Amino acid sequence: MKRTNGKARFAVCLNNDNYEASLELGKIYQVLPDAKAAKHGLSRVIDESGEDYLFPADWFHPVKLPSSVQHVLVQAAS
């Protein structure tokens, strides 16, 4: 997973219509900050391919995870 400055941000996937190979419902994904995308209702998410892509923001719900859990998720995907 890619990491940006500061704490990693995560969200749970609530919808994967037509992207079943890229996103799993109920799975937690890392979300990268992207102000330009957010203005268009999109979130930059690191999907199952390990790359970041834009998806509708309302497909995800932000979750706050303890830093120890964030560390494990980031390390596991590296």
Image (tube, helix red, strand yellow):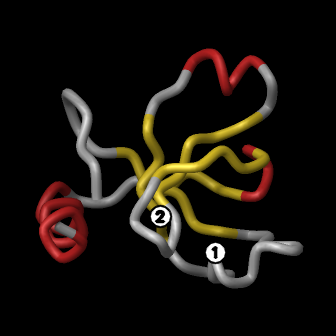
Mark 2 touches mark 1? (CB < 8 Å): yes
Where is residue 65? Give x, y as percent: 32, 59
* Foreground of the two, 27 or 66: 27
Q: The N terminus lies in which quarter of the figure?
A: bottom left
Residue labelled with disc 2 = 29
Secondary structure beneath dot 1 equals loop
- The amino acid at mark 1 is Leu
74 to the left or right of 43? left
Q: Residue at image x 78%, y 47%?
A: 56
Q: Is residue 5 above or below residue 10?
A: above
Q: Which image quarter: residue 40?
A: top right
- The amino acid at mark 2 is Tyr
Q: Which mark is residue 8?
A: none
Where is residue 61? Give x, y as percent: 64, 56
CA separation in Å, label 2 and label 1: 9 Å
Q: Which image quarter: residue 30?
A: bottom left
Q: Residue at image x 47%, y 64%?
A: 29
68 to the left or right of 17? left
Residue labelled with disc 1 = 23
Q: Residue at image x 74%, y 70%?
A: 14
* Foreground of the two, 65 or 42: 42
Where is residue 5? Give x, y as percent: 20, 28
Secondary structure beneath dot 2 equals strand
- Mark 2: few/some/many CA within 10 Å (<14, 14-19, 20+): many
3 to the left or right of 31? left
